[in-house]
Amino acid sequence: MAVLTRDAILRELELGRVVIEPLEPAQIGPASIDLTLGEEIRILTPGGRLIPIRDGTDYREYTTPHRLVGPFVLDPGLTIHAITRERVTLPTDLCGFLEGRSQFARLGLMIHVTSAFVQPGVSNRQVLEMSNVSGHPLEIHAGVRLCQLVLMRTEGHSTYRGRFAEQEHP
């Protein structure tokens, strides 16, 4: 696998093999594409309820959706689900990884707890598992470029058809 640089990303966009909507030219970096925080989040329901970690456990039973119409204070130790504003569509021979941006990581904002992989052949908005690992509350805002998508060529072709293949909400 090889990471795509800016010229390769631009070529894939021009050919229509990679589609990111909406996308501003300034979002394309030397080897990644910045993605912005959308206006929807899910918050773990407070109360200390036991959550079984096993096949079939549905995160929606333990979280509540909220609109991010103003700033949201992410308290230390809290994890929320958010979603990118952009829809990412990849061909069957490209995959990616979502990475946090260092300017926010240095303040204690983690963009992904564990599942940063973007499968080949997807066409969806990307969920961000955002955690505050600092000792300070962090104020998050919709529309901020919080993460970056690093694209890589795969060996062979594949299409993700799993549970989150057409995801539109966190």
Image (cartoon, helix red, strand yellow):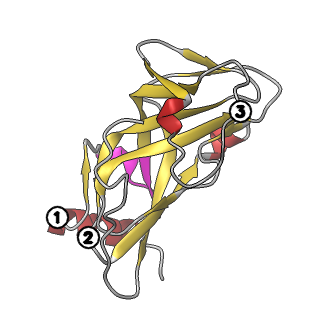
Q: Residues within 10 Å of mark 3 (few under 14, many from 20)?
A: few
Q: Tell me the amino acid under the disc marked 3.
A: Leu
Residue holding disc 3: 50
Secondary structure of the residue carrying numbered label 3: loop
Q: Quadrant of residue 77?
A: top right
Q: How many marks?
A: 3
Single out the residue that lies furthest toward the bottom: 156
Tell which circle, 3 or 1, labels the residue nearer the N-terminal end. 1
Residue 30 visible (yes or no): no
The residue that appears at 16% across and 69% down in the rendered structure is 15
In the rendered view, tell whether residue 161 sits above or below residue 125: below
Q: Residue 5: name its quadrant.
A: bottom left
Residue 47: x and y in percent read 70, 18
Rendering coords of residue 45 (x, y %)? 60, 22
For the C terminus, give its image quadrant: top left
Q: Is 168 in front, or is 104?
A: 168
Give the amino acid at mark 2.
Pro
